[in-house]
Amino acid sequence: MVTLYDLATRAAAEGGETVLGAADLETHACYLMYGVVEVGAAPRLLNPGNGHEEIICVVAGNAALKGPGGVQEMAPGQAFHLVGEAAHHLENRGSVPVVYVVAGGHSAGHGHHHH
């Protein structure tokens, strides 16, 4: 049997977003984030950080993605790719919560330095 992780409950307890990664999985190869932007909530910052890449997929609700190039509307099932310090904000402009998942990992040539 594989271990099941209740990411919806964890996200609610952790302020709207939770990370399933090294702390749970003992791996630095990949991680997954699950987040909910409630109706009327502040936009959620999406920023992989130096040496990381993320694919963000909206799975429920209608979101507005704000980035350096402007605003793009996102519907469920749509995804985009961010690399490094490419900060964007995901905003809920609808009447139901926006739910999204983030699949992340390390960019080529980047590794964690262990002390």
Image: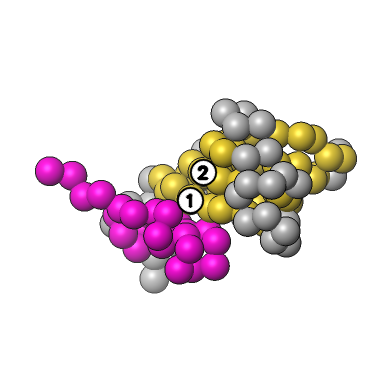
- Identity of the residue drawn at 62% across and 40% down: 61
Image x and y of residue 82, in percent: 65, 40
Q: Taking 110 as reference, is 76 above or below it?
A: above
CA gap between label 1 and label 2 equals 6 Å
Tell me if 54 is positioned left or right of 19 in this view. Answer: right
Q: Do callouts 1 and 2 mark residues in contact (Cβ within 8 Å)?
A: yes
x, y percent for residue 64: 75, 42
Q: Quadrant of residue 24?
A: bottom left
Which residue type carries mark 2? Answer: Val
Q: Could you classify mark 1 by the number of other residues whose Cα lies within 10 Å: few (under 14), some (14-19), or many (20 or more)?
A: some
Q: Nearer the viewer, residue 18 or 28?
A: 18
Residue drawn 45% across the image and 68% down it: 13
- Which range is magenta? 1-25
Residue 79 position, x and y percent, is: 61, 32
Asked whether 39 falls inside the magenta stretch, the response is no
Kindly identify which residue carries mark 1.
33
Of pointers 1 and 2, the one earlier in the residue sequence? 1
For the point 56% across and 53% down, the residue is 36
Q: Which residue is mark 2?
A: 101
Numbered circles on residues, count: 2
